[in-house]
Image (tube, rainbow, N blue to C red):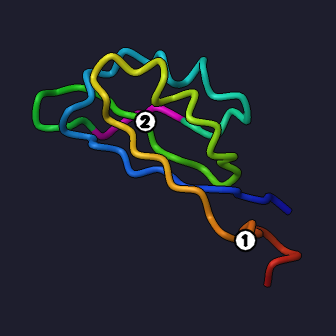
Amino acid sequence: MTVSLGTLVIDTEACKGCELCIDACPPDVLRMTTDIVNERGYRYPQLLPGCIACKACTAICPDFVFQVYRYEQPQQHGEAAE
């Protein structure tokens, strides 16, 4: 089971694919797309379950593509959540 404390909105069209957010993410829940690119031809991050709303991605992103939202109650994902 995975627990998320928040979620992200990612402006994928503004992303330049620098991947700084991937290394900065403590719970390791950001992954770069492999076969999808934005209109400018860059790969961009996708969010997996488990965001802790720490805002490390917003602090490191040079293009300000992230908006972080914290849930009022933790969200559970996986078998135990069903």
Element type where label 1 sits in the image: strand
Where residue 10 appears, x then y in whole percent?
36, 45
Can you name the residue that lies furthest to the bottom here?
A: 82
Q: What residue is drawn where x is 47% and y is 50%? A: 8
Count the labels in the image: 2
Give the percent coordinates (x, y) of residue 6. Answer: 61, 56
Element under disc 2: strand
Q: CA distance from mark 2 to mark 1?
A: 25 Å
* Residue 38 left/right relative to 53: left
Please tell me whether residue 16 is drawn above or below residue 1 in the rendered image: above
For the point 55% across and 24% down, the residue is 22
Q: Quadrant of the N terminus?
A: bottom right
**What residue is shown at x 27% (from left), y 29% (from top)?**
15
**Which of the 4 image quadrants contains residue 82?**
bottom right
Q: Which residues are magenta?
A: 31-36
Of marks 2 and 1, the one in the foreground = 1
Q: Position of residue 19 (x, y in %)?
A: 44, 18
- Tell me the residue that label 2 is attached to: 45
Q: Residue at x 70, y 56 (%)?
A: 5
The amino acid marked with disc number 2 is Pro
Task: Answer with mark 2 or mark 1, whichever residue precedes in sequence.
Answer: 2
Judge whether 57 appears above or below 51 on screen. above
Circle 2 Cα neighbour tier, 10 Å, few/some/many (<14 / 14–19 / ≥20): many
The numbered mark at residue 37 is none
- Report if residue 64 lies within the magenta region: no
Tell me the quarter of the picture where residue 40 sits.
top left
Name the residue beneath numbered marker 1: 73
Q: Is residue 49 left or right of residue 82?
A: left
